[in-house]
Image: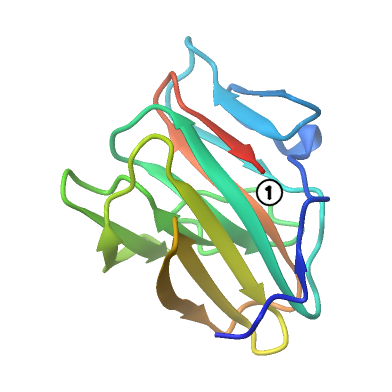
Amino acid sequence: MAEADEYDKGDMFDPKTCLGGVILSNKNRTAKTDNNSTGDMTVQGTKEYTTGVHEVKIKIDSGSGINWYVGVCRSGSKSVTYNSGNAYYFDVFCSSQSSSKVFSGRFSAYSNKCNTGTIVTIIIDMNKKELSFRKGNQDLGVAFTGLPEKVKISTQMRHKNRQLSIL
C-alpha cells in the first residue's frame, strides 16, 4: 500500500448531496441520521480525488447494526447505495462478528466488525486506482482495484441514531 501524499483534513460532507434524512453539523464534518427517517441515507464528500494518494479518517461516533457503509463513490453519482454500482464501500457493522467490502450488492469478507469509537481510514490511491482501509491501527489491505477516474468519499447509513465524523 502506498504512503499517503496527504492526510486530508480539508474534506467535508457536501450538503448538496444529502439524501434521505442526513443532518450535517460541525462545519459539515459530522453526519447524523434523522430520528424519523428510514431507508438509505447517503452523503458524499466535497473533494474530488483524481491523482495522488490520500487518507481520510472517519470516526464512528454513535450507532450500530447492519447497513452502515463508508468508502468512495464515482464522482457525479446521484445514487450511491451499496447496490448501485457507483460506490465502493466497507460495511463497518455487517454482522455481529464480521465486516465486509461491498460493490454492486456483492459482499466479500474483509475484517472483523467495528465498534462505536472506531476510526476508519479511507486510503484512496488514485495513482494505482486502488482503495484500502485501516481500522484503528490495523491495515486491512487493498479492498478494491480499478477505481473510476474521479471519486469522492461517501457514506450510506440506514436506520436512525447513527453518526460519524471526518477527523
Say which residue appears at 47% left-offset and 64% top-offset.
134
Given the image, on which type of amino acid does mark 1 rest? Lys
Coordinates of residue 136 in the picture (x, y in percent): 44, 55
In this rendering, the answer to whether 155 lies above or below 105 is above
In this rendering, the answer to whether 61 lies above or below 140 is above
Position of residue 111 in the picture relative to residue 121 (left or right): left
Coordinates of residue 25 in the picture (x, y in percent): 72, 22
Residue bearing mark 1: 78
Residue at far front of view: 137
For the image, the number of numbered tags is: 1
Position of residue 3 in the picture relative to residue 92 (left or right): right
Q: Toward the viewer: 7 or 82?
A: 7
When asked about the image quadrant of residue 6, the answer is: bottom right
Residue at far bottom of view: 128
Position of residue 100 in the picture relative to residue 16 (left or right): left
Coordinates of residue 16 in the picture (x, y in percent): 80, 35
Judging from the image, the colouring scheme is rainbow
